[in-house]
Image (cartoon, rainbow, N blue to C red):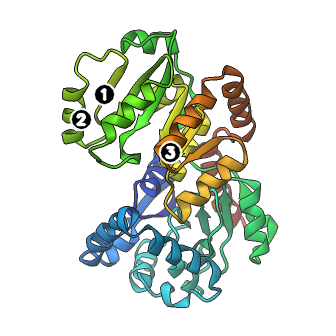
């Protein structure tokens, strides 16, 4: 049995979601061929420091956006990132020596991988955003799996051999390739097929006292129904349920495992520009309004989607209303959905897993 060392990171949920999707696919189709050893490398190497840095990371998204953006873009410009490489390196080296994997797959930027020069183990980076960043570059990496041709071009311009960069898409839960029966889903959830449905991620707005006003203004745009996903924020869910009690066109949901169903059956999704979330939206062909993206990977993801006609960026409430008005036109919705169908790379998770297994077999047979 071959062993995959899967490196992930819990700074944001996206990297964990990608690693979970890969693990599920390996278990489903290659359980007798491959074993997975997963490591949240930074957390394991720095268990006391990581919770503090994660809090600062989340805090910076709300209160120090410009500083976060400066650090992100500075990291992109600087050619020498050697100082970052030593974070977690000693733990990584010991982990590799202990597990002796047949391949190392990283779904989180891990500069320490560049220091593993003495090993013959192939290293694969699965890039989880739509934009190139220097932190993904790994000396002597065997492959890079990226989301789009522009990203591949950027890696090649940074000195990576073109043959090492494969455009396979961002791995997401494979159930997003299965179609949902909209009529049955609406009947189950007491929604009207005659109204446009706006799916709204409450986390994209933050918890503000003006949130209810925003929801009312969205409803006033036209003959709409709004589904609000509150996630694990039970306090917000209870507040909204109280304030919108009896409003049939407003449905409030807490944490849900049914994002495929909600995305596929909605007409517009208002959310943040996380790499996995917008990849799931792309698979679901639901036009996007990307709300106030944070400078850095969120902003670059949003700009890529807007440039390609897949989304609109809204930095203010008035821009949300403007974009919703645009999407009230069925022809505009159809054009965006057609572009999404063109840009979407289906079966990304399956193809990444197949490619990983192919590399293992290729190296074994040398």
Disc on the earlier residue, 1 or 3: 1
Occupied quadrant, residue 94: bottom left
Q: CA distance from mark 3 to mark 2?
A: 21 Å
Please tell me which residue is depicted at 41% across the width and 9% down the height of the picture: 187
- In depth, the one of 270 and 284 nearer the eye is 270
Residue carrying label 3: 277
Please tell me which residue is depicted at 52% across the width and 61% down the height of the picture: 107
Q: Is residue 172 visible?
A: no
Residue 57: x %, y % from top left: 37, 68
Residue 183: x %, y % from top left: 50, 10
- Binning the other alpha carbons within 10 Å of mark 3 as few (below 14), some (14 to 19) or many (20 upward) gives some
- Residue 357's label in the rendered image is none
Residue carrying label 2: 237
Q: Quadrant of the C terminus?
A: bottom right
Q: Is residue 79 visible?
A: yes
Q: Are marks 1 and 2 in contact (CB under 8 Å)?
A: yes
- Residue 252's label in the rendered image is 1
Disc on the earlier residue, 3 or 2: 2
């Amino acid at each position: 049995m071959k062993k995959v060392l899967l490196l992930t990171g819990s700074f944001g949920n996206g990297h964990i979601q990608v690693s979970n999707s890969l693990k599920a696919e390996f278990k489903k189709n290659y359980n007798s061929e491959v074993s997975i050893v997963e490591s949240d490398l930074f957390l394991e190497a720095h268990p006391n420091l990581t919770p503090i840095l994660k809090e600062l990371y989340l805090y910076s998204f709300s209160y120090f956006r410009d500083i976060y953006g400066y650090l992100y873009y500075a990291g992109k410009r600087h050619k020498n990132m050697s100082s970052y490489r030593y974070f977690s390196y000693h733990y990584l080296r010991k982990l590799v020596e202990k597990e002796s994997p047949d391949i190392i797959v990283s779904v989180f930027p891990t500069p320490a991988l560049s220091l593993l020069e003495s090993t013959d183990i192939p290293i694969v980076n699965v890039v989880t955003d739509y934009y190139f960043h220097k932190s993904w570059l790994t000396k002597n990496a065997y492959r890079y799996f990226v989301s789009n041709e522009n990203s591949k071009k950027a890696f090649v311009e940074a000195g990576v051999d073109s043959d090492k960069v494969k455009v396979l898409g961002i791995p997401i839960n494979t159930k997003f390739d299965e179609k949902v029966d909209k009529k049955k889903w609406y009947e189950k959830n007491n929604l009207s097929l005659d109204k446009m449905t706006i799916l709204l991620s409450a986390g994209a707005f933050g918890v503000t006292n003006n949130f209810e006003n925003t929801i009312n203004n969205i409803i006033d745009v036209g003959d709409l129904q709004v589904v609000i996903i509150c996630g694990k924020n039970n306090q917000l869910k209870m507040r909204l349920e109280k304030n919108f009690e009896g409003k049939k066109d407003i449905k409030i949901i807490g944490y849900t495992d049914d994002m495929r169903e909600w995305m596929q059956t909605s007409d517009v999704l208002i959310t943040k520009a996380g790499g996995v979330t917008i990849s799931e939206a792309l698979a679901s062909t639901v036009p996007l309004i990307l709300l106030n993206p944070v400078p850095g990977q969120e902003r670059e993801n949003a700009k890529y989607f807007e440039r390609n006609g897949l989304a609109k960026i809204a930095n203010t409430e008035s821009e949300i209303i403007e974009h919703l008005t645009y999407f009230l036109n069925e022809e505009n919705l159809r054009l965006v959905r057609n572009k999404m169908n063109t840009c979407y790379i289906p079966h990304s998770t399956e193809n990444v897993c197949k490619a990983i297994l192919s590399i293992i077999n290729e190296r074994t047979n040398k």
